[in-house]
Every structure is written in structure tokens, then in C-alpha cells.
Amino acid sequence: MYDTQHFTVTPEESAAATIKAGLDLDCGPFLAIYTDLAIRRGLLTVTDVDMALANTITVQMRLGMFDGEPSAQPYGHLGPRHVCTTDHKQLALEAARQGIVLLKNSGSLPLSTSRHRTVAVIGPNSDVTETMIGNYAGVACDYTSPLKGISRYVRTVHQPGCSNVACKANNLFGFAEVAARHSDATVLIMGLDQSIEAEFKDRTGLILPGYQQELVTRVAQASKGPTILVLMSGGPIDVSFAKYNRRVSAILWAGYPGQAGGTAIADVLFGTTNPGGKLPMTWYPQSYVAKVPMTNMGMRPSRGYPGRTYRFYKGPVVFPFGHGLSYTNFKQSLALAPTDLSVLINTNLFATKNYSTLSSNAIRVKHTNCDSLSLPLHIDVENIGNMDGTHTLLLFSEPPASVKWSPNKQLISFHRVHAVAGSKQRVKIDVHACKHLSVVDEFGIRRIPMGQHSLYIGDLKHSISLQAILEGIKN
């Protein structure tokens, strides 16, 4: 606030402002250095500090930190044996499995242990451990790197290709090409780590760092068998070159998958796990960076500014928000879907000349009875493929075309559905008009637009017509 953003003229003013605003604990030394001066200058009272201290100590009391020696405290004896249980390790593995997103598959995945007996494992992230937990993580119980995970299925030949993700030299590429040329399949594990993207480090572009793209292209060209690209990163990467390269037969995004990431990646590669993850963000092309200055946090597009997120951005993408493939095929159909909804308006509002209730054919949310504006939606999800799998159903809503100040569409609900091959599962969703069909206008007022709203579930589109009706409300 003080050093970089210049929110206040002096550091003690920042200390006073934050404590008064409710900051009870500082992770650094700032408050310890400047709070006393803030009190002596009259910017802060001892009572203000006592309140912050009381809040902090109260939490410590609830944790039993004043109840004798640490070993005698309720939580003082916790250690690795409590954290690294079988159940917790399994949960870490399951989280990694569910988080992996299959971005592209030309039919080469899953790999076969009988046909792909030797796999070349290549890339700067191929044998990493700590990279997989990202940041803000505790001490891992143990690690399974991608190389170790794949080695549990088949014989592996390992070549890093680059000494790290910066990949500033290509002198090791020849060894990687030889490994790919003599293996039944090649898995390239590329991407980023905390040296490229972190809380204190912004990326300057969306493409793979250094010579990584060249490594992928050369290895894919040399590979005797299918080439699979696995990406580790926290943010999107423009891998258009690999998306449209026929020699790269599949692309997986693993995020930073945690301590069991290598096991999860291998399980997906060999079909023990059927991927069901969806992208939680839009993957933009590199050209997007030049159009979006870091100083503009606006969501809506304006004057050459393309806007941000799937809700407003309409330009080209590498992979869209919510994208994710599976080894099986799912079919979605509507079993129950109302087509009309009446929105009742309190006529007393008009009696008091509150004409802002109905503006631009949109009703203020607080001027109707939201409890009565619920629509039941029943969706059947059928697994029409040959493999059991989990499908993530995404329900989007889009307001009437006449509403100019709203997003294009917005995600209003999602559900994970596990279905064995040949089975059908029914998902029941309540669509609430005030919550799911409302939008915020240019004045910051949340309104429900009247007219035809559209609901999208994959390739399905369903229309719901909203009509305003006046109703007298008795006091």
C-alpha cells in the first residue's frame, strides 16, 4: 500500500488505515515497525490495537495455544502421521485425477501397455516433484513424478531436453529426438513453474518459454509412435502450434497436480482413469496480450479493448472456457424444461412513483418475490461410449438480445455425473430467476430482463420466456 501503490503519504498512515479497516494480522514486519508511530501521531488509538490483538489471541486460544506445553495442547501433537494417512494420500491422487483436462485427442489415447511397451518421457517437467505442488502448499508426504508414474506401467527412456522450463538452449534436443525415434510412444511434459509464474512474477507472454516449442515440434517429427503433450501450468498457454500439428496426437493439461501428480498423469495416459476435467479459464492466443494492457482491469469490451473472460470476450481462443474431452461419449437431453415464467412486480412501488423498478424492460431484483421464481430443469446424461466415465455438465444462461449491457453468457450451474458405459443419469437443477437469469446494468443495479432467455447445455439450447405481471402486495 505504501511502498508500491502510494495509498498514503507516510507508512504509519498505512498502518493506521489497515488496522482501522479490520486487518488484525500482518504476515510481514510492517505493522510491528510503524504501529507505535501511528499511535504517537494520533492516527491510531491503543484501543484499536487492543481490538486487533484480541481477535488474534482469541483464535490462538481456540487452538489451545495457551494450554500448557505444545504436546499437551489439543492440536500440538499433530504431525506427518496424522497428515500422511492412506485416506489423505488417496484424496490427493483423486484430486489430481479429476483436475486433469484432455484438450486434444486424435485417437492415440489411452496408450496400451501391450502396444506401447517403451515410452520416451521428455521435457523439463518430466521428472519434477516440487513443481507439482505450485505455491502456498505445505510439505508433501511424498512425490510421484511423471517419469516415476509412467515407469510403473511400461519401460521408459528419459531425456529432459531442457535443463529447466526456461529452456534457453537446444543443445540437448538431439538426445530427445533419438529417444523418441526408438520408442513406441513419446510423452512430452512441458510447461511452466514458479520461476515463470508466481505471486511476485507476472508472465509477459502466453507461449511456452524459450525453446520449448521447438523441442515439442522436433520430437513430434522424430517420434516413431504417437506423441502426447502434457502441460503443467497455473495459467493458459498458447499451444496453437501443437493443437494444429498432426504429429502431436493428444494434449493434456495437468495444472500443478500435487504430490500424486505423476501417478494421476500416468493413470490418464494409460486409461486407468478416464479424464473428465474442464478448463476453468479461457486459453487465449498470444495476440490477445497486445490488446489487453495490465492497467485495464475492465471486463467489458470497449474502444479496441477486447474484454476479459468467456462472459465478454468474443475473439479467437486456443481452447474455450469449460473445454474438456473424454475417452467415452456422452449425450445430453432435456427431460423437463419449462418454457415460461411470470415475474410478479409489487404494485405498491408504482404507487410511490418508483419508476426505476421497470427500466429497459428489466425488473429490479429487490422489487419482486425471488422465492417464487424457480424453474425445475431435468437433464439426462447418457454414456453412449464403451468406457465408464465422469461428465461435467455445464449450464449457461444468456439474456435476451435486446439487453446491451449484459455478458454474452454466464455459467449458472455445473454438476459432475459418473455414468458407466451404456447407462443414463438424470440431473435435476433449479434455475432461480433472481440469481441465474439476472444481470447487473451499467449503473450497478441487478435486474431481471424480460423476454426470451436462452439456456445452453453443450449443444442443447432451450428458451425460457419471462413476462412481467403487476401484483398488489398487502402490508
Image: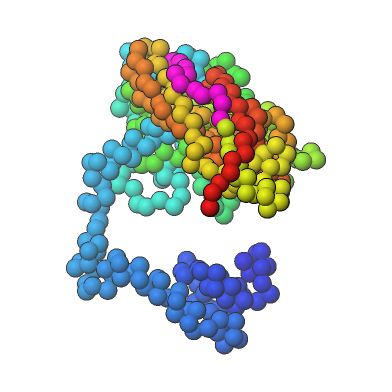
Q: Could you tell me what secondary structure mostly forms the magenta stretch?
A: strand
Residue ID at (64%, 27%): 452
Apparent side of residue 62 relative to residue 473 in the rendered image (left or right): left
Apparent side of residue 365 relative to residue 138 in the rendered image (left or right): right
Colour logic? rainbow
Q: Can residue 33 be seen in this view?
A: yes
Quadrant containing the N terminus in the rendered view: bottom right
Furthest residue toward left: 72
Q: Residue 223 in the image: state x and y as whole percent.
A: 50, 17
Quick one: 224 or 424, which is closer to the camera? 424
Q: Judge whether residue 235 is colored magenta.
A: no
Q: Residue 405 in the image: state x and y as whole percent.
A: 71, 39
Residue ID at (45%, 46%): 134
Quick one: 452 or 256, which is closer to the camera? 452
Residue 89 found in image quarter: top left
The residue stretch that appears in magenta? 328-341
Quick one: 343 or 225, which is closer to the camera? 343
Apparent side of residue 219 relative to residue 50 in the rendered image (left or right): right
Count up the numbered dots. Answer: 0
Quick one: 436 or 83, which is closer to the camera? 436
Residue ID at (34%, 35%): 94
Residue ID at (69%, 42%): 358
Q: Residue 249 in the image: state x and y as whole percent.
A: 51, 18
Furthest residue toward right: 303
Q: Residue 122 in the image: state x and y as whole percent.
A: 46, 29
Q: Can residue 398 be seen in this view?
A: no
